[in-house]
């Protein structure tokens, strides 16, 4: 893992001290809210429906055991005993008091964390594949590049007042577990002729106008990456629309100017940017990369795993569903589901955080990851420890064997917390998960990604859900629109709207009808929901959603 | 109703008939005419040392006091639906 340098430490400490003084000036009346608001947002402090909300960055989703323990301490001491992991690999605290926030920022700084650039029209937390450094299918660990980008983008003087927020994601695997195509810039690390570089996608994003990122350049060698990124953001900074908030993201800039023009402008800007870097970034990257050296893998990692696997069906189901292939023999990547049916997707109590920290320390080389799907990952687990981990997770209510299944739902906080929301997300997720648990169909249904957003901003990634649900306010009533066939993988697809929406008390039944339609039409258990949808199109699913339309058609 | 969030806690508050801020929507002042609503809003905007983000929310009289017209305001008066926090905690 990356360790803060003296510079990093001093920078984060000074920002926390500045904010302490800013809060004091707000409280003594020296600063108005209009003056204070941009300052609090620069430190991740939002005002939501019921309270302030502090959004803390978890760079590229990587946490140490100590950091996780500190998050637990913060949740207990200054909040209500839990935190919410988000689709951008951040953690949010929903109940901080304004006067306590400087103390929270100090406590974060104690473990090399902060809330800088988790808001505002800046480059936000850089996200990455949560299996980084562990996945068997990885070309290269994306985290050194992500860390380099974090250092470059933090407090970058040219990019503190962009037309709108700017999000980067990096993956080192062809599987793309970071939804890179839904980011302002998506980077996919690839090898070309023995050199490591990145395929650069630009102009992806969900929200009001969902778009899939387009390839700006097939291969940018790592030595050119930062100046190339700087050229892109510089061009966007000048061209991006500042007259209309809803057209200010780079996806609209690319759409309005065309990919060719943007590419020409970036290529024209690049040489001057390249000249400014003079190789110092490569020295930094080399030093950062060394810090991400893999742990000393246990040569006896396999142990008795096989025997336990065959002896215990519950353990076997958990392993089959929640683990992924690791690069090292005898190791596995374990995803711990924060989606126990009936619970709030992405929430973890302080006790659960401590359990996860302890397990990571005891069995997993001290590392944890947060995924954009709001789960926690133990990236380096010797398989001989899986049984002990499973037992400990069971005691903590964290052993749901549902990763990638129907109850592993992404949901934004929605109108239970968020001031932007138009409808609730969390209770819909809770009810859908509970419904399918009662039906005992989850494992039969197989891979199915349901994603729920409580407003058009699409924090719940509904556009790339196999089943996407968007909560809207229709004439003063919560109404839920369904999209079908979205995909957040390497060949990302935006889902298609499936007719009129449903009321709050209709949406769970509608999703159940959808799933039954899939089960009725699928070509055997090996054909997943998305494959059936692609084979048959939307018609049978729309008919299941809106049986009354069929009746009308027959009557006509 | 005129509503805002408390500066220190972030908690939702409403303007009460005596000009103070109340944490209970049922104790809020129901403002009947648009002219005085605008004046109340101007006054609230000058009270930034007490509250953040004041705005007017549609309401109608109810049995226990003013009731919100929109479900968003009902949530602000109650708290989140997934945990027993916020106003429902003290109710």
Image: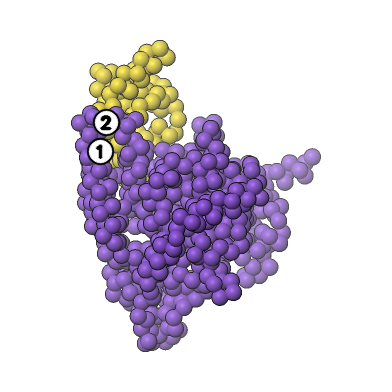
Does residue A428 show up? no
Q: Which residue appears at 66% of the width and 59% of the height? A: A533
Please tell me how crowded label 1 is: few (under 14), some (14-19), or many (20+) other residues with Cα within 10 Å. Answer: some
Residues A461 and A556: in front is A461
In this rendering, position of residue A103 left or right of residue A245: left
Q: Are marks 1 and 2 in contact (CB under 8 Å)?
A: yes
- Point out the tag, 1 or 2, that comes first from the N-terminus: 1
User: Residue B40: x, y in percent?
Assistant: 34, 17
Identify the subunit bearing mark 1.
A
Instruction: Indicate which disc residue A31 carries.
Output: 2
Look at the picture and state if A362 lies above or below A411.
below
Q: Which residue appears at 35% of the width and 18% of the height? A: B42
Residues B61 and A276: in front is A276
Please tell me how crowded label 2 is: few (under 14), some (14-19), or many (20+) other residues with Cα within 10 Å. Answer: some
User: Residue B55: x, y in percent?
Assistant: 38, 25
Q: Residue furthest right?
A: A556
Question: What color does chain A have in the rendering?
Answer: purple
Give the distance between the C-alpha atoms of the residues marked 1 and 2, in whole angstroms. 8 Å
Q: Which residue appears at 49% of the width and 76% of the height? A: A136
Q: Which residue is mark 1?
A: A22
Question: What color does chain B have in the rendering?
Answer: yellow
Task: Quarter of the image for the C terminus of chain B: give it.
Answer: top left
The colour scheme is: by chain
User: Residue A371: x, y in percent?
Assistant: 44, 61
Does residue A194 show up? yes
């Amino acid at each position: 893992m990356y360790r803060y340098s003296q510079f990093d430490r001093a920078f984060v400490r000074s920002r926390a001290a500045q904010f302490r003084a800013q809060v004091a000036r707000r409280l003594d009346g020296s600063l108005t809210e209009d003056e204070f608001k941009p300052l609090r947002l620069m430190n991740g402090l939002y005002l939501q429906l019921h309270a302030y909300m502090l959004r803390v960055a978890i760079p590229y989703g990587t946490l140490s055991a100590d950091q996780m323990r500190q998050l637990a301490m913060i949740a207990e001491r200054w909040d209500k005993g839990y935190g919410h992991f988000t689709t951008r690999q951040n953690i949010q605290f929903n109940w901080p008091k304004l006067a306590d926030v400087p103390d929270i920022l100090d406590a974060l700084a104690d473990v090399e964390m902060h809330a800088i650039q988790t808001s505002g029209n800046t480059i936000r937390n850089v996200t990455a594949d949560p299996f980084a450094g562990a996945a068997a299918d990885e070309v290269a660990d994306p985290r050194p590049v992500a860390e380099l980008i974090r250092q470059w983008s933090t407090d970058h003087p040219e990019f503190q007042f962009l037309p709108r927020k700017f999000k980067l994601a990096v993956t080192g695997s062809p599987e793309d577990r970071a939804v890179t195509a839904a980011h302002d810039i998506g980077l996919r690390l690839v090898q070309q002729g023995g050199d490591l570089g990145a395929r650069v996608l630009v102009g992806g994003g969900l929200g009001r106008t969902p778009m899939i990122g387009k390839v700006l350049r097939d291969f940018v060698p790592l030595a050119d990456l930062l100046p190339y990124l700087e050229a892109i953001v510089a061009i966007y900074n000048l061209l991006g629309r500042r007259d209309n908030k809803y057209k200010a993201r780079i996806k609209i800039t690319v759409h309005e100017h065309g990919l060719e023009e943007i590419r020409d402008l970036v290529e024209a800007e690049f040489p001057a940017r390249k000249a400014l870097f003079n190789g110092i970034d490569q020295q930094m990257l080399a030093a950062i990369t060394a810090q991400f050296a893999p742990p000393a893998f246990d040569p006896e990692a396999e142990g008795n795993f096989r025997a336990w696997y065959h002896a215990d069906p519950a353990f076997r189901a958990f392993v089959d569903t929640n683990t992924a292939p690791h690069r090292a023999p005898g190791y596995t990547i374990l995803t711990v589901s924060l989606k126990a049916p009936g619970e709030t997707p992405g929430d973890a109590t302080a006790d659960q955080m401590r359990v996860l920290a302890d397990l990571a320390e005891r069995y997993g080389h001290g590392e944890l990851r947060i995924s954009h799907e709001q789960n926690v990952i133990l990236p380096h687990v010797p398989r001989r420890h899986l049984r002990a981990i499973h037992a400990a997770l069971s005691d903590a209510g964290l052993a749901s064997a549902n990763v990638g299944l129907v109850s592993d739902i992404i949901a934004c906080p929605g109108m239970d917390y968020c001031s932007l929301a138009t409808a609730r997300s969390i209770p819909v997720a809770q009810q859908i998960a509970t419904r399918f648990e009662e039906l005992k169909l989850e494992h039969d249904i197989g891979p199915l990604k349901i994603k729920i957003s409580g407003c058009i901003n699409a924090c719940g990634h509904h556009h790339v859900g196999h089943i996407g649900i968007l909560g809207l306010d229709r004439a003063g009533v919560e109404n839920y629109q369904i999209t079908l066939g979205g995909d957040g993988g390497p060949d990302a697809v935006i889902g298609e709207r499936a007719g009129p929406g449903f009321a709050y008390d209709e949406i769970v039944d509608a999703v159940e009808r959808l799933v039954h339609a899939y089960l009725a039409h699928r070509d055997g258990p090996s054909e997943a929901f998305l494959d059936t949808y692609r084979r048959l199109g939307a018609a049978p699913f729309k008919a299941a959603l809106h049986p009354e339309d069929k009746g009308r058609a027959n009557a006509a | 109703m005129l509503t805002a969030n408390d500066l220190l806690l972030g908690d939702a508050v409403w303007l009460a008939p005596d000009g103070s801020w109340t944490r209970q929507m049922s104790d809020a002042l129901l403002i009947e005419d648009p002219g005085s609503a605008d004046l109340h809003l101007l006054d609230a905007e000058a009270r930034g040392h007490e509250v953040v983000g004041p705005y007017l929310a549609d309401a109608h009289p109810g049995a226990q006091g003013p009731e919100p017209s929109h479900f968003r305001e009902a949530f602000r008066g109650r708290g989140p639906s997934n945990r027993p926090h916020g106003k429902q905690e003290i109710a």
